[in-house]
Image (cartoon, coloured by chain):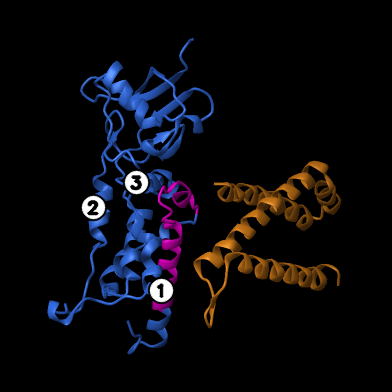
Amino acid sequence: MIREWTSFFVAVFSLIYIYELSLFASGAKDSALTLMRNPGIVAFNVLALLFTLYHAFTWFYLIGKVQPIKIGKTTSKPWQALLVNIALLLIISYAVIQILILR
Amino acid sequence: MSQDIATIRVTRYRPEKDGKPFFQEYKVPYRKDMVVLDALNYIKANLDGTLTYRWSCRMGVCGSCGANVDGVPKLTCASFLHEFKGRTIKVEPLSHFPVIKDLIINMDDFMHKLVEIKPWIIRDKESPPEDGEYRQSAEELERYGQFSSCINCMLCYSACPVYGLNEKFLGPAATALAYRYIEDSRDQGEAVRFPIVHEIEGVWECTLVGECSVVCPKGVDPMLAIQKTKILGATNALKSLLMPRGSGK
């Protein structure tokens, strides 16, 4: 049931994020940055990220279990689907960071 | 030498006498090789003959003795006392089912769902016996073999939070059984079963919690069956869209 608990952290993260955006939108940039740098908020974000990654990795493994790929006489294993999807996650995350954040 | 004792806290509910369920404690002699069912049988034979519960084979093949043991759906015949922490063990009726008495639950909803998915080989046209048996390769058997191991113990329904919220959900065991027949090469009943499993309260209610597969005592993996049924349904829908006249099976 741990995977179901990730939705709690995602929901709380979303509320905090919306609040931060509202501070930016209203011109209170300094307040927004102070909130984002708050050690408690940073710790919560790290925890939410860990739960989200747990959700993602267990989901990737299940993809491999539910829909194995057959090539000739060989059928893929769930751990292979996990590795491929982790690799794709890293590549896409790197691309997003490069294009949207570090430009 | 003092005897080792286990305390079994059992839910009691006699609708003709009790307004609501309550726990009753019994002290039973503890042996390392005792299972929860042994403890219940000891209670019934020696301490309280009114205790009511289901059991039959006592070896994990009939599915009769399901109960919540320390909050987890288990077969009482397959749960050793030493698996649980301490010497006090709580035994309750399976969750998400109405309770008739003590540990006996009303399984009408589950029985109805089993029949609903038509758990038999459906053929467009039956071959006469003189044509011989339906041949099936080992690979064809492997496609559905795992899902034919279900003993209808309902532990999966007790563990499923979706069924707990919505009793109209078709549920793990019924879907696994439907998938067992859909994947059986001898079966031609996809057109009959698909509308049943692909209702909103069929497979699509499942949110992939997976607890059904965790508690299954026979390794059926109903969660896998549900997801595979979803893929079949989605594939079928796509085929119907792309090939409306000839989408095949």
Give the CA separation, mark 1 to mark 3. 29 Å
Chain letter for mark 2: B
Q: Nearer the viewer, mark 1 or mark 3?
A: 1
Q: Nearer the viewer, residue B247 or B7?
A: B7
Name above or below for residue B56 compared with residue B242: above
User: How dense is the environment of label 1, judged by Cα within 10 Å: few (below 14), some, or many (20 and up)?
Assistant: few
Residue B202 shows in this picture: no
Name above or below for residue B230 compared with residue B159: below
Chain with orange colouring: A
Q: Nearer the viewer, residue B217 or A25?
A: B217
Q: Quadrant of residue B60?
A: top left
User: How dense is the environment of label 3, judged by Cα within 10 Å: few (below 14), some, or many (20 and up)?
Assistant: many
What type is the residue that disc 2 sits on?
Answer: His
The residue at 29%/28% (across/down) is B102
Q: Nearer the viewer, residue B78 or A49?
A: B78
Q: Quadrant of residue B62?
A: top left
Q: Dot 1 corresponds to which residue?
A: B139
Q: In the structure shown, which secondary structural element does the residue marked by tag 3 occupy?
A: loop
Q: Dot 3 corresponds to which residue?
A: B154
Chain with blue colouring: B
Name above or below for residue B102 compared with residue A22: above
Q: Nearer the viewer, mark 2 or mark 1?
A: 1
The residue at 72%/47% (across/down) is A47
Residue A88: horizontal and vertical position, in percent? Answer: 69, 71
Q: Can you say which quadrant of the picture contains the C terminus of chain B?
A: bottom left
Residue A95: horizontal and vertical position, in percent? Answer: 77, 73
Q: Where does the magenta region start and end?
A: B209-237
Q: Dot 2 corresponds to which residue?
A: B112
The residue at 41%/74% (across/down) is B139
Q: Residue furthest top?
A: B1
